Amino acid sequence: MSTRAAAIPTLQLDNERVRVTEWRFAPGAETGWHRHAYDYVVVPITSGSLLLETNAGNVHAELCAGRSYSRSVGVEHNVINAGELELVFVEIELKP
């Protein structure tokens, strides 16, 4: 069981086509292990460092404010703020 603080999700929109969630991570906070049920786009609001725990091992990634990226359905991971400042991004899930 993790001793990290939980990242804070705020649901902004959820309809038949999309789900939009703002995620706020204090330094060291995590999402917890999860599997994405939909394709999704991440829009970073702040820049910062992530640690992604995956079944294939840990991956470090840098987020750059305003530089979006997308991933396909099925991604399974735990997302952790590896930086020393709050990290914020918006996740847009695309429903079929």
Image: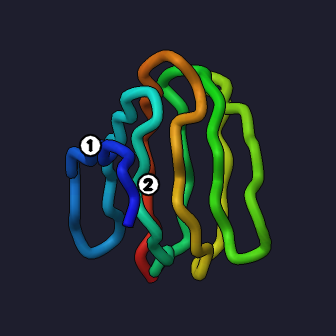
- Image quarter (top left, top right, bottom left or bottom right) of the N terminus: bottom left
Name which residue lies at 36% across and 51% down: 3
Tell me if residue 61 comes above or below residue 3 in the rendering.
above
Tell me if residue 76 comes above or below residue 47 in the rendering.
below
Which of these two is toward me, 16 or 90?
A: 90
Element marked by disc 1? strand
Q: Earlier in the sequence, mark 1 or mark 2?
A: 1
Q: Amino acid at mark 1?
A: Ile
Q: Is residue 57 left or right of residue 83?
A: right
Q: Is residue 69 left or right of residue 42?
A: right
Q: Amino acid at mark 2?
A: Ile
Q: Position of residue 49 (x, y in %)?
A: 65, 30
In the rendered image, which quarter is residue 23 located in? top left
Mark 1 and mark 2: span between their CA atoms? 16 Å
- Image quarter (top left, top right, bottom left or bottom right) of the C terminus: bottom left
Query: Pointer 1: what residue?
Result: 8
Q: Position of residue 37 (x, y in %)?
A: 46, 80
**Label drawn at residue 92:** 2
Name which residue lies at 74% across and 40% down: 61
Name which residue lies at 32% across and 61% down: 19
Name which residue lies at 33% across and 52% down: 20
